Amino acid sequence: MAHYTKACNALAGQKDYAMTQNKPKQDATRKTKPNIQHESPYFAAIDLGSNSFHMVVARVTDDKVEIIDREKQMVQIARGLQPSGSLDIESQERAISCLHRFSERLKNIPNSQIRVVGTKTLRSAKNSSKFLKAAELILGVKIQIVSGYEEARLVYAGLANTISKSEQRLVIDIGGGSTEFIIGSGLKPIRLESLPLGCVTYSEKHGFNKEGPTQVTVRSAYYSACNRLEQLRKNFIKTGWQIAYGTSGTMKAVAELLADKDGGAVITRQSLNELIKDTIDQGKIEASNVQKLRKDVLPAGLAILQAIFDQLQLDTIQIADATLKEGLIYDTLGRFCDRDVRIDTVNNLIHQYNIDQDQATRTSRCARDLWSQITGPNLEGISRSKILIWAAQLHEIGLNISHADYHRHGYYLLRHSDLAGFGRYEQYILANLVRLQRKKLSDKRFKDLGSSAREAFEPLLLCLRLAVLLHRRRENIDTEVRLHQNEGIYTLTFDENWLDSHPLTQAGLQQEQEHLSRIGITLSVE
């Protein structure tokens, strides 16, 4: 159980780690107290992990958050990832069967209060789109595929909101396909990293599935993990921490196996080394009461964990219950009480890339006003008004690189940066709005969107392009701008004689009509 106020305030501290060195001025519209606006007291989060699928349901009452239901299934979709990069039919069927069971518990919870994320395996699978569509149909909500960076941030959010201590801590989450490492203090992550160290993938890669835990397989996995850990070892040790936490099912299973030595709430280096030796020599894991599916992948997890202990010079890891799924609950609560971490990310980008804040404000206000006057299809899983405002605020981000083709530079920055709070699809839409804000348009630019997404995307793009064009002089415009939509035709209207006194804008709008016509949008200017 945790306080709701804490949940709302938590997101204020979870800035994009790479952007926290220069803090921008606080947005004047942000509130200092929670603004609670949700339909139901119930929230749900589902983590589609590479090893297990997890679901939690939380109830918000007065100022408290209480987890009232948990469900876990070891689906192990990472086992179904073929050398070709495709997810096999059997693993997809296991996953769909699990989600059918989960969906029953989601009934009567508003879609806006349900978050579902996919991690390493679904990030990697080349054919995941068909599976995701089927899964979304069952759950009734959009599934967000999150980056390793965002996965790490959510893991830390889950732990930080359920532990009262504020000392600097290291958090480690060993999953089926990746392992997340986070150093943070209080509610704020300081350093985030995700490495492709997974107990399911390592079981296959290093021969555990065929040969079992032998000296050869354990050493092979151990040295491979040590090699990966070299990427973060120096910087993490330099940053430092006072206490280390383990948050994954692998960590908990190891702690339970060592309960007679360490008490079940911690893992020590000495006990871990003894467990590995006993597993190789005597088959200790196979003889234990650990669940069968966990037994199959735990030896690889032990090798990864031993490498972590050695490379990060750990003696003890404390076991914690909360992880990504709890982080999703708190992140969702933040969006309902004006503590949306995505706003902080956008503000930090504005500051980091020296974006003209006055121009960003003018353009975003105009884009928002134009959008409020028309309608369009829903863009599944995305707030259209928010994504449009953020794209307008960030439309000049590429100027920091070069004035020539700055819209293309902006696309690259937004498409490939780690943006705290944004899912991959949401980031894709944001980047493409910035990419297509100016110059010529063609149908080939929309080939990856799909017909329904394109239909929802085009009205947003229209509003952004018009807002950018109307503010080329980098000053407020002294006319009311009205946008009307009727039977597929958009009509842009200004005060009488205003266009005659602004011939450059008039010429720009005439050219814009031609650009838009190439993708089937008809714009009339009056």
Image (cartoon, grey):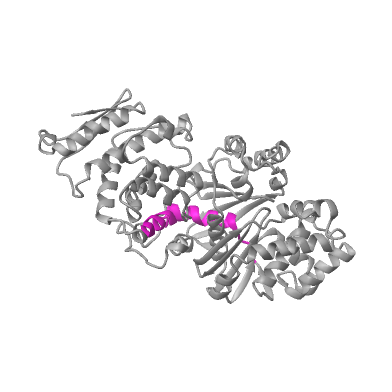
Q: Quadrant of residue 163?
A: bottom right
Residue 320 x %, y %: 64, 65
Q: Quadrant of residue 339?
A: bottom left
Residue 174 visible: yes
Residue 23 x %, y %: 37, 66
- For the record, the magenta segment spans 320-349
- Please name the residue shown 55% across and 41% down the image: 108
Majority secondary structure in the magenta region:
helix
368 on left or right of 165: left
Q: Is residue 449 positioned above or below 292 on the image?
A: above
- Please name the residue shown 42% across and 45% down the image: 431
Q: Nearer the viewer, residue 414 or 187?
A: 414
Residue 370 x %, y %: 27, 38
Q: Tell me the quadrant of the picture where the N terminus can be found.
A: bottom right
318 on left or right of 363: right
In the rendered image, the residue lying farthest to the right is 282
Residue 338 visible: no
In the rendered image, the residue lying farthest to the top is 487
Q: Tell me the quadrant of the picture where the C terminus can be found.
A: top left
Whether residue 471 is in magenta: the answer is no
Q: Quadrant of residue 122?
A: top right
- Please name the residue shown 34% across and 56% down the image: 400
